[in-house]
Image (cartoon, rainbow, N blue to C red):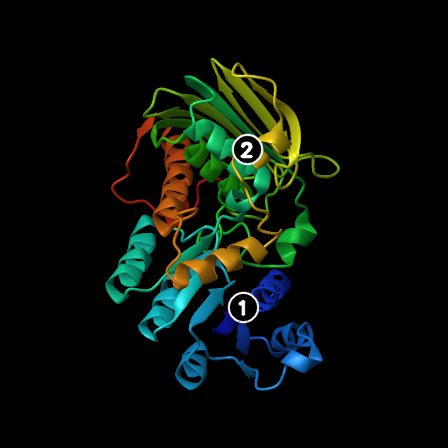
Amino acid sequence: MKYALIGCGMISPNHIKAALASDLEIVALCDLVEENRQKAFELIPEDKRSGIKLYSDHQEMLKEVKPELVAIALGSGLKRKLSIDCMRAGANVIVEKPIALSLEDADAMINTANELGLKLIINHQLRFGNTVRALKKESENGEFGKILHGTVQVRRNRNKAYFDAGKWRGTWAEDGGTLMNQCIHYTDLLQWVLGSEVSEVFAYTDRMTHPYIEAEDLGLAILKFKNGAYASIEGTVNVFPKNLSDSMAIFGDKGTVSLEGKTLDDVKAWNFESGPKGRDEAIEEYNIKDMGSGHIPLYRYAVDVINGNDDKICTASDARKALELILAIYKSAAEHRVIELPLNNCKTTDFTGRFD
């Protein structure tokens, strides 16, 4: 399958590694910055470089090499145009999270994919971990009994050098803040594991220690789900002096699971009334196959989906729900009130000037 990458910045090594591991034929790399293109090219083994073309213009690339799959690894404000351009040229698309920064853009992307019969795959990669998939199975099988509430804590350090490395970071037009950037993987998992959509949100957000960014560096939210469960979200990039472990927990009247770590593989509790078993036993019981780490499982999933083996682990509609939840949190914090979902329309730039 012919593959191209648009965006050869900091995340590009993950994409190239995953493309190679998935036996994709890399035919083109595209970036406005020549140095970025060259660095990405040099990541590819010499015996696989033959025929790879480097571009600064994605339209020229699409016209000349006609890729079947394109990954877009650029600022979120560019995703609608780039992804639709790729799909109009006949390519399936992988997009880094979040799917977009407005519901209108997300809908346009999803509708284009549906109209053209192409696949739009969003990188919510935590869904592919063995532990998380076992947790999802436990929830689907009713092992928690009545699910009561969940918690998410994302406590990280992001200093000025981090934001200076990408001028789009922390802007409303290209990124959003800690909730949209660092927390969206985990808020996505809450909805997926609980098996329910959020009905109401109340939240606070603030910019506490990063006066040089536009968006929030702290977010606190309470969610109410349609199935009657609740959840709390804490996200910050103000932790001194370095990151603490990310965590997620699910509590039911017949079960408790508590996970930590960047991929939520560190099990702190895995307890069910149905009997004594742990994560490893659950993985074996549900016949969960190891899909690899990093971006590799996403790429393998994308190839399977394009080839017609769609098992619905992570759909573009799921990614839209994750976006909608973060936007609802922003709206609640800005308007100091409970926000009911679904939203009619919302975008990050609605909150421009929020902390000025």
Q: Nearer the viewer, residue 1 or 12?
A: 1
Give residue 218's position: percent from left, percent from top: 55, 34
Query: How far apart are the alpha carbons under marks 1 and 2?
Result: 40 Å
Where residue 255 sits in the image (x, y, percent)?
52, 18
Decide: marks 1, 2 in contact (CB < 8 A)?
Answer: no
Q: Is residue 113 left or right of residue 65?
A: left
Question: Which mark identifies residue 285?
Answer: 2
User: The disc labelled 2 sits on which kind of residue?
Assistant: Glu
Tell me if residue 172 can be seen.
yes
Residue nearest the viewer, comparing 267 with 12: 267
Q: Is residue 221 visible?
A: no
Say if 120 sits above or below 2 in the image.
above
Residue shown at 26% from the left, 58% from the top: 111
Q: Residue at x 61, y 64 (%)?
A: 21
Badge 1 is on which residue?
7
| Callout 1 secondary element | loop
**Kind of residue sitting beneath label 1:** Gly
